[in-house]
Amino acid sequence: MPQWNCGCDNCRLARSGDARVLPRTQDAIAVRARGDRVLLVNASPDVLRQIERSPELHPRAARDTPVAAIALTNGDLDHVLGLLSLRESQPLTVLATARVRAGLVERNAMLRTLARTPDQIAWRALPIGQEVAVPDVGVGVTAVAVAGKLPVHLVGVLAPSPEDNVALRVRDLETGRVLLVATAVGSLDGVERLLEGADAVLFDGTFWSEDELPAQGLGRGRARDMAHVPIGGPDGSLRRLATWGGRRVYTHVNNTNPVLREGSAERAAVERAGCEIAFDGMEVAL
Ligand SMILES: [Zn+2]
């Protein structure tokens, strides 16, 4: 926010420095338990800026990174393009479902830049429903299949699979506390089960309404067609999240979404329900 080629109300306000709309980088999450090693959830196209702005993510030696692993929720470009920026011969551990990995590596010669040396990239399988421990960070990561869709560039190339899009339950191995990351949710069926046992959730806040883009003259795509349930409306996520007890933060918010504008009716509705809108540098302590 703003999006480089967008002149919608939000983007114009953000560009003009209006205090109601904070500029934001693309959604990205760094998880830390009690050590100083970090798990990244997704690698956004803004990952280099995000690392520079976060002292916890700076190197502590001549060649070093506190990033112990990167867990991917799907293969969408806004979640994986940052992998290409994290090359510089840095060994990386990437957790992904077999399908997400296949879509990235087998079909994309550019990703081979992350495999210049045999030990550069360590893929760790993220089977649905099985916790994978990341001991360096002190967390376990469990993928949960969530209604989603293939990344646009893989439609017609790979057959759809439940592994295309997952939510991640990130569990502190010592305290057992759970952060649920669900940045792309195409259906609210079973959402209560998804939230069960979590202490906080970062939830899909892409769109406020089903017809947000067409209504602003920005294309024909409807929210659910893009595998994002809208926040608002009788069938939206806010109604379902409103009664849940944990900390609730909307993330992955599209630049067109009126919740980004402080003082808007939509923002007020989110806050009345006790939910929050993510911003750069936000900390969620469990
Ligand atoms: Zn815009």
Image: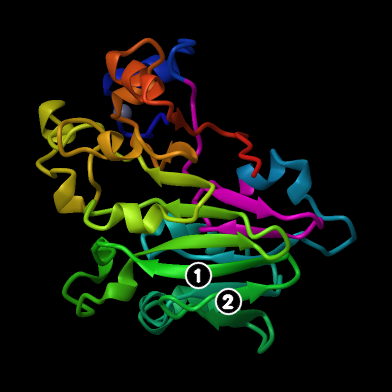
Mark sitting earlier along the chain (1/2): 2
Residue 274 is situated, as x and y percent measured from the top left of the image, at 43, 26
SS type, badge 2: strand
Question: Image point 64% across, 75% down: which residue?
Answer: 133
Looking at this view, is 46 or 135 the one in front?
135
The residue indicated by pointer 2 is 132
Amino acid type, callout 2: Val
Query: Measured from the top left, where is residue 166 in percent x and y?
Result: 38, 65
Look at label 1 and name its amino acid: Thr
- The location of residue 29, given as percent across then percent down, is 56, 49
Query: What span is in magenta?
Result: 22-48
Magenta residue check for 176: no
Task: Tell me if residue 11 comes above or below residue 201 in the rendering.
Answer: above
Alpha carbon of mark 1 to alpha carbon of mark 2: how far? 6 Å
The overriding secondary structure of the stretch rendered in magenta is loop
Image height of 37 relative to 278, above or below: below
Q: Residue at x 64, y 44 (%)?
A: 286
Q: Is residue 100 above or below residue 59?
A: below
Instruction: Assess whether mark 2 and mark 1 are in contact (beta carbons under 8 angstroms).
Output: yes
Q: Is residue 193 visible?
A: yes
The residue wearing badge 1 is 142
